[in-house]
Amino acid sequence: MRRIGVIGGTFDPIHNGHLLLARFALEEIPLNEVLFIPAADPPLKPGAFAPAAERLAMVEHAIAGCDDFSASRVELDRPGKSYTVDTLKTLHQTHSDSALFFIIGADNAAQMNSWHDPEGILAQCTVVTGSRSTNTSGGDTRLIDRLLFIDTPLIDLSSTQIRKRLTAGLSIRYMVPETVETYIREKGLYTTLCS
Ligand code: ATP
């Protein structure tokens, strides 16, 4: 049976924290491949700053040349809020011979009780949690106890910080792949105030 990792996010923009989380999960579990799934309409955020097509393009640039990483449009092609439980259902239909591993950062694990249908998510996949400088404290331990924790390097980067730096005219070199930085500059993304 194939083992597929799924990393969902707003990817506004994708950064090296996302990429390292996915790479370490792939090695540690181990997985055959990881799908990056940009959310069309993230349920727990007020909305994205860059349009969905541009967030997807940045993901595609970031993973170009990596045979075991790919980008999926599954949430972009579905109207309404991008609920993980629905995405997993679709992936089970399209990858019926595979076990799914949903990869998240520790900050996300702490919010699990506010996710839509966490039981439905846990029934369909193993939720894998990497390290993040924000920890899981304050989360619902009945849910957190059912997660698979893996050791990943602590990379204190967020898309918020990157957007703020771009708005302030600061460098984002080494925070995102060079191809992503070039795309952001060419498209003039995040030049007006975003937080
Ligand atoms: P924002 O700052 O806009 O809220 P973000 O940097 O948290 O964005 P998301 O696209 O929301 O990025 O994150 C997608 C997933 O990646 C989440 O599960 C999140 O916990 C995880 N993640 C993001 N950045 C890191 C990081 N630096 N280290 C570990 N996990 C991360």
Image (tube, rainbow, N blue to C red):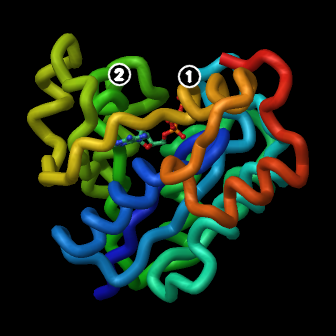
Residue 73 lies in quadrant: bottom right
Q: Position of residue 83 (x, y in %)?
A: 58, 38
* Pointer 2 residue Cβ closer than 8 Å to ligand 1: no
Mark 1, residue position: 44
Answer few, some or many: residues within 10 Å of disc 2's Cα (few below 14, many 20 plus, some between 14 and 19): some
Quadrant of residue 164 within the rendered picture: top right
**Mark 2, residue position:** 111
Residue at image position (50%, 88%) is 67
Residue drawn at x 44%, y 71% as measured from the top left = 34
**x and y, in percent, of residue 15 in the image:** 53, 49
Check whether the beta carbons of the residues at disc 1 and disc 2 lie within 8 A of each other.
yes
Q: Residue at x 41, y 79 (%)?
A: 33
- Residue 109 location (% of width, % of height): 29, 31
Front one among 72 and 87: 72
Q: Residue at x 51, y 68 (%)?
A: 35
Mark 1: secondary structure: loop
Q: Amino acid at mark 1?
A: Leu
Viewer-side residue, 164 vs 39: 164
Q: Residue furthest right?
A: 187
Q: Quadrant of ligand 1?
A: top left
Precedes in sequence: disc 1 or disc 2: 1
Q: Is residue 41 left or right of residue 162?
A: right
Q: Is residue 72 visible?
A: no
Q: Amino acid at mark 2?
A: Gln
Q: Is residue 164 left or right of residue 92?
A: right
